[in-house]
Image (cartoon, rainbow, N blue to C red):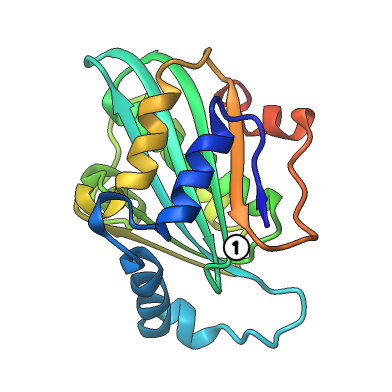
């Protein structure tokens, strides 16, 4: 089953992905195989039992695009369910901002979305070096603006039973990057959601729920 909503040209884009078997960019099922492997090798995978009541795990890919610095910006998120049978796509228009702010807002968007979907264990991956390093406590955010966004991430992080964040090369985050590129053309704070999957119980978030994910609520 393929469900699509809120995306411009969503039906065509998602159908193309399904027909290609997730082969965009020649990756084939690499992203899904990498997801299973990294979860199995990580603390998240070793401490989580799929039999645990009401516990769900996911992998989050986040990215941000800024056409100039500062300039028009967008955030993109791809969220994979634990068995990769469900892939959610999210994007948000960020208006005019800097690269650093946009990257933090992309991570915040993804974490808020994962919580809204009921996930309790999460592994985040992105190509933003400074976000990954700062969230891992290896480098301190200095400006008040960045520190505020860092604190938002820390608060969201505590709401998960387990949390990991890793830096990856841009080529491994290209689906989230694609969403971020499209998000540049959205209005500030506009959030769009889409999904590929076969979960008949999955329903789109209400417009009011999507609004709470927006940067306007940070």
Residue 49 percent location from the top left of the image: 61, 87
Residue 5 percent location from the top left of the image: 67, 35
**x 34%, y 57%: residue:** 23
**x 54%, y 28%: residue:** 9
Left or right position of 144 against 25: right
Query: Visible in this render: residue 118?
Result: yes
**Foreground pick, 63 / 69:** 63
Left or right position of 124 against 196: left
Which quadrant is home to the N terminus?
bottom right
What residue is pinned by disc 1?
A: 160
Secondary structure under tag 1 reads loop
**Foreground pick, 84 / 62:** 84
Query: Visible in this render: residue 147?
Result: no
**x 78%, y 28%: residue:** 208
Q: Residues within 10 Å of mark 1 (few under 14, many from 20)?
A: some
Q: Quadrant of residue 64?
A: top left
**Foreground pick, 115 / 203:** 203
The single residue placed furthest to the front in the displayed view is 19
Residue 104 vertical placement versus 129 (above, below): above
**x 25%, y 50%: residue:** 25
């Amino acid at each position: 089953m393929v469900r699509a909503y809120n995306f411009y040209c969503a039906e065509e884009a998602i159908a193309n992905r399904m027909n290609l078997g997730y082969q965009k960019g020649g990756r084939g099922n690499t992203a899904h195989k990498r997801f299973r492997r990294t979860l199995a090798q990580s603390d998240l995978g070793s401490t989580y039992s799929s039999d645990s009541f009401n516990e769900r795990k996911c992998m989050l890919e986040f990215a941000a695009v800024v056409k100039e610095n500062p300039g028009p910006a967008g955030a993109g998120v791809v969220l994979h369910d634990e068995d990769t049978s469900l892939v959610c796509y999210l994007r948000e228009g960020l208006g005019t901002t800097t690269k650093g702010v946009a990257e933090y807002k992309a991570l915040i968007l993804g974490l808020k979305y994962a919580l809204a979907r009921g996930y309790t264990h999460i592994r985040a991956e992105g190509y933003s070096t400074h976000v990954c390093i700062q969230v891992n406590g290896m480098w301190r955010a200095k400006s008040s603006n960045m520190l505020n966004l860092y604190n938002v991430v820390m608060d969201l992080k505590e709401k998960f039973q387990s949390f990991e964040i890793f830096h990856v090369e841009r080529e491994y985050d290209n689906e989230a990057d694609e969403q971020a590129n499209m998000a540049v053309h959205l209005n500030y704070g506009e959030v769009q959601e889409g999904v590929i999957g076969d979960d008949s119980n999955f329903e789109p978030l209400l417009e009011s729920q999507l609004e709470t994910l927006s940067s306007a609520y940070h």
